[in-house]
Image (cartoon, grey):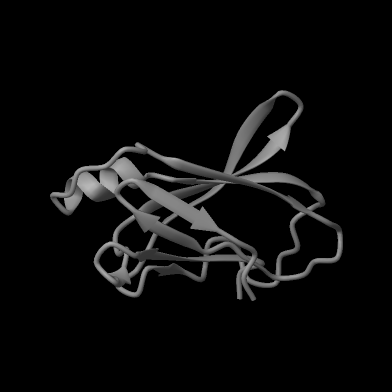
């Protein structure tokens, strides 16, 4: 399994957010370097964002969720054209699940299991 996984739920409709594009980036100096990209499946999940059994180095990472494109594709209005979730990985190699609860005018996240 990928060290980093995600699950996006459209809380306004009570369903998974399928087809939402995501980029995973690592902070390097003063800029971000994209290290992985994916699109949520029919269950709103990406379980293979990073190669299986590959531990990412400790550092600051960002998941960029293309929420505006997702809402446009589902004929919904939106307020946030994207949501960037920035988090820190330690050097333990632990699994990190970064879920996003999404609605047209708000979102929230937490470290899942």
Give me the residue at 66% from left, 26% from top.
31
Residue in view at x 31 percent, y 38 percent: 79
Image position of 106 with respect to 14: above or below: above
Identify the residue at image location x=30%, y=41%: 68
Side (left or right) of 9 relative to 100: left
Image coords of residue 94 (percent x, y): 77, 70
Is 101 displayed left or right of 17 in the figure? Answer: right
**Residue 58 picture location, percent across and down:** 82, 51
Asked which quadrant contains residue 77, the reply is top left
Q: Quadrant of the N terminus?
A: bottom right
Give the number of callouts: 0
Image position of 72 with respect to 55: above or below? above
Q: Position of residue 100 (x, y in %)?
A: 48, 59
- Location of residue 4 (image quadrant): bottom right
Which quadrant is the C terminus positioned in?
bottom right
Q: Nearer the viewer, residue 2 or 14?
A: 14
Query: Is 38 displayed left or right of 105 in the figure?
Result: right
Q: Residue furthest top?
A: 30
**Position above or below: 104 against 109:** above
Which residue is the extreme one toward the left? Answer: 75
Q: Nearer the viewer, residue 60 or 3?
A: 60
Q: Residue visible at 35% across and 75% down?
A: 43
Q: Position of residue 34 (x, y in %)?
A: 57, 40
């Amino acid at each position: 399994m990928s060290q980093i996984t995600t699950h996006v739920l459209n809380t306004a409709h009570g369903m998974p957010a399928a087809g939402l594009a995501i980029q995973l980036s690592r902070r390097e100096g003063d800029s971000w370097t994209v290290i992985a990209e994916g699109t949520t499946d029919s269950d709103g999940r990406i379980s293979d964002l990073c190669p299986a059994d590959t531990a990412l180095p400790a550092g600051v990472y960002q998941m960029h969720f293309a929420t505006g494109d997702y809402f446009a594709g589902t004929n919904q209005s939106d307020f946030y054209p994207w949501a960037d979730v920035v988090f820190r990985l330690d050097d333990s190699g632990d699994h990190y699940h970064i879920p996003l609860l999404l609605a047209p005018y708000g979102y929230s996240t937490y470290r899942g299991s």
